[in-house]
Structure formats: structure tokens, C-alpha cells
Amino acid sequence: MLNIFKRLWQVNWAEQWQYRANLAMYILYWLVSPIIYLSVWTSIATVNGDVKGLTANDFITYYMILLIVDQLTSNIIIHIFGYKVQDGSLSGELIKPIHPMLTNTLVNDIAFKTLNMMLLIPIWIGLALLFKPQFDSVSLSGIALAIPAIMLGYAINFLLSGIITSLAFWTTRVFSIHEFYYALIMLFAGQFVPLKLMPEVIQNIARVLPFQLFMYLPIQMIQGNLSAQEITQGYVTGILWLIAALIGFQIVWRKGVKQYSAVGA
Amino acid sequence: MTSETILVEQLSKTYQVPEREGGFVAAVKGFFKRKYKDVKAVQEVNFKIEQGEIVGFLGPNGAGKTTTLKMLSGLLHPTEGKAVVLGFTPWELKPDYLRSMTLVMGQRNRLSWDIPAADSYLLAQAIYRLSDDDYKKTYKELDELLELEPLMKKPVRNLSLGERMKVEIAAGLLHRPKVLFLDEPTIGLDISGQVKIREFLREYNKRTGATILLTSHYMADVTALCERIIIIHHGQLKYDGGIANLSRRIAPFKLIGVRLAQSEAEGLEESNGRDLSQYGEPVQNEEDAEKVYIRVKSEDVTKVTSRMLSDLPIHDITIADPPIEDVIERAFNE
């Protein structure tokens, strides 16, 4: 199995590397919205002194960390996989004795992520020089605490995206469904605004949803803003979601493959 | 358990195809209530194939050949009926089954477009869990037969159609499958490319004892490779048996071609326009415009020929079996 992933990595890395110019464009596009939020909130906080106790530096560090965490927990499997279902090229993969989504697509996504990080790092350093964040509250233990949370967030996000992408077996509108999923992430993961500034109702909803693991919780862990109870709560919620997403994915996948093979691969 | 490698019983596949008229109103109606039309792609097909056979699977476009191959390889669930291949039910997609068969369809299937085939081959080695020794041995054999080595280092997108077909077929065989489903393995290839693939398949079958079921539009593929053919038309089995028997059963005819000696005044047109229908049914033959062809029942050939020789100023005469295309065409229309 390890050998399969090694070879998959070589193939997918070589493939992604061919498209590095496209990726650079994608990264620039993707950077726009967090940088806008960063600028807006920072200027408000600068004018007011703070926003509900968050200073300009809090916003800068929040969004600077978000740039990295978002990149690590997000995925592009709708783009890798959705088309394969629609144009039938999935057929070639289905008759290979490995799971197309949990092997090839997963590795392709990780290769994409790795290349993205390579492009992001110089940009990130440039932004840091521009906005001059003070990472005083960031500690190594905070980062260590956040790493499993980021992995958990990636796994849940991957499986939920996988469920939505698998809807491509039934409908050609899967891309718009996925857009809605993105909107939920934007709202409940703390991209528009750190969740702390959201109305109490939204915060309560966000606490039982998995999305805050995609950005907000790991960022807060890195910044050292969470109590032990909040951390435990976040992890427990995450693990429950991971189990649910795994089961949900298995069910949808199996039914989807059957559907695919029923209507004509 | 059955002893056959492939067993197909009452296999049927009906597609539901959404159907609507053109225009806006119909589009709106279709949004709320879709109409479906049942398309019976395969209807109650039965056959058995023994280990080591090479069987040609023939039929016009839309006859249900590809649908059947897809069901046998596990990509499609049948609507009814059963199929057992190597003891497996294909559409359960059991890894052990997938490791012992291959399906080759078109030239863009197993290989990644952007990278050299060599990388995709190494991936296949890992996926099919082939030991280095086994992999090298199989690769060497395939390379011997198909001359793969010069093609391995180029990205697949830069290969020509024929080259791509070769690396695709070889990619599908690295794991030494016991059963091969080949959909148009020579499509788009020039004559020498077709011959190479054909020779390769025959050799592979001889060396490994693999069972091969192939579809092709090139009758030469079929006549060169298959002793047995299965014909389907409109999803139904029309014929299952030897190629030789097919001509005898369906078209017990011979083709007589004559070129008449011409007087100087008489042009070719006129001589060819001569009415030969009293001897047999005239047949068009575009490849050989010099001759006039008639179709005659096999048992009458001697009689008709001698009559023609005595009646007509014959310059040249040939007697041949009708081309297999025509025979099969007749089988479809039966």
C-alpha cells in the first residue's frame, strides 16, 4: 500500500508540476479575499482602537495564520473528481483494484497542496513584511496542539467534499452544490470574520458544525486563545464529525458507483 | 462453480434515456416531469467462452457490444440476467477480479496524459502488486512484441495515435490478466499498426493462455484472430459459432467476377453495362471497377461459370467467397 502511495505521489506530483503556472494564477486569485478581510478589519480596528477587544495586530495575525491553515485544510477534489464522473474518464479508474477517491484523488490533492505551499511561502513572507504582524502570543505548544486539529480538519473537509463530489454520480449540478458548501465554510469557519465577532447564535451553531476546525479553531490554538475545555470540545466535535463523514462517504460512494454503472459509464 | 471462463446467461441491459422535444416550453415541462424512453441495449444474451479462446464480438454501431463488454468488466450493472467471469460476478468490482482481467477501450484510458508512460507503468506495478521480477519479465515480453522502449520516456500526449494504442494495450496487460476485453483495439491505426496489434494479441494468447473477447470494425482483425465469432444486432444474439460456418450458413454464395474482352469500338462502360442478371444477382464492387460481379449460389457455380464461358467473350474470370463484411451484413438483416 505504501508503495502505491509512493508511485501515486510521483505521478501526481509530475502532473501538478506541469501546471505550476496555472497554480500560480490560482493562488493569486485565492489570496484576494482573505487579504481584503484582513485589510478591512485592520483598518476598522486601527480607527476604533479595537473591535470587541480585538486589536489591529490580532486581526493581522489571525488572517496571516488563516492563509496557511486554510491552504492546509482545503481541497480541490470537486475539480479533480467531478469532471471525471461527467466525462466518463472515471471508468478507467473504477476497474483498477484501488479506491479512486481515497488513493489517486487524495494524493493528487496533496500534491496540489504541496506545490501551493511552495508558492505561498514567498508571498506570505512578502505580506508579513508589509503588514508587520507581532506573533507574541504564538507558542510552539500552540502550534503542536493545532497540527492534529489541522489534520482532522483536512480529513473532515476531504470527506464532506467527497460526499458532495460523489453527487456528480446523480446530477450535473454538483459544482453549484459545492459552491454552497464553500459559502458555509466562509461563514462558519471564520473566514469573513473571526467567529468571536459573530452573533451568539451563529457561534453556537458553529460550535456543533465541523467547519470551525477548517480555520478558526486551529488559528485560535496557534494564537493561544482557547481554554482547555474549548480545545477538548473542539476535538471531540471534530472526531464525531470525522466518523459521521466517513460513514456518510462510504454510503454515498457505494450508491454512487452503483448509479454510475446503472446509467451507463 | 462453472468451468467456463466467461458465462453469460439472459444478460440484459435497458437504459433509461431522458427524452424531450426541442424548444423552451418543452424544456420547462421537462424540468418538472422528465419523460424517459427505455432503450434496450442488450436483450437476453447467452454465451459461454472457454479458457484460451479468442472470440470476435461483432455487430453494427449501437448493437450492444460495448454495453456487454462494460457489464463483463464490471463497469455496468445489468438490468437482468447473470454473468460469471473467472468465478466472479463482475459488477461487484472485487479487487481480486479487477486484478485478473483488463478492459481496453480507446486510446485514453489507463495512462496519464501529461507524463511519460514509464511513470504510469510503475504506478500500475504498485497498484497490481507486481514484484520487480514479474514486472520486468512481463515488460520485457511486451516490449519484444510491441517495441515499447522508444515510447516510454515521452509524455503520452506527444505520442502518435498508433504509439498511444500500443502503450495503452501494454499498460492494460502488465498485470498479466487472464481475461482481456478489448473494445476496438485497432481503431484508427494504419494497416501495419493493425497487423502489429493483431500479431501481438495472437502471440499473447499463445504464451499466456488468456481468454480474449474483442470487438472490431476491421473484419481483418476478426478473420486473423478469431476462430469463433458472436454477432449481436439490436441487442440480440444473432450468431455464435465458427467463422467458416457463418459463410456457409448465412451466405452460401460465391462471387463470380468477369472482365469481358472489348472490341475497339466498345468502351469499358458498355461492356460493364452488359446485362448479366440472367446468370446471377449483380453485385456492386467499388474496389474493382474493371470487373462485373454476380452472386451465385455455391452449388450452381460450376454450371453458371461454364455457361458464361461459352456465352460471353470473357477475358478474365474469378470465383471467390463473398467478403466477410457482406456475410455479416446479411446476418444482421436476417
Image (cartoon, coloured by chain):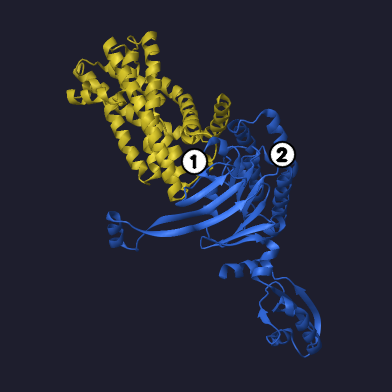
Q: Residue at x 28, y 57 (%)?
A: B28
Which picture quadrant has residue A49? Answer: top left
| Horizontal relation, residue B69 to residue B149: left or right | left
Residue B136 visible within the image: yes
Q: Which residue is mark 1?
A: B92
Q: Is residue B206 left or right of residue A97?
A: right
How many C-alpha atoms fall within 10 Å of the one at disc 1: few (<14), some, or many (≥20)? Answer: some
Chain A rendering hue: yellow
Which residue is outermost to the front?
Answer: B1
How far separated are the C-alphas under marks 2 and 1? 36 Å
**Where is residue B232 shown, x and y percent of the image?**
56, 61
The amino acid type found where label 1 is placed reads Glu
How packed mark 2 is, by other alpha carbons closer than 10 Å (few <14, some 14-19, many 20 or more), is some
Query: Which amino acid type corresponds to the residue marked 2 in the rendered image?
Result: Glu
**On the image, numbered disc 2 is attached to which residue?**
B149
Could you tell me which residue is drawn at 40 percent across and 30 percent down?
Answer: A158
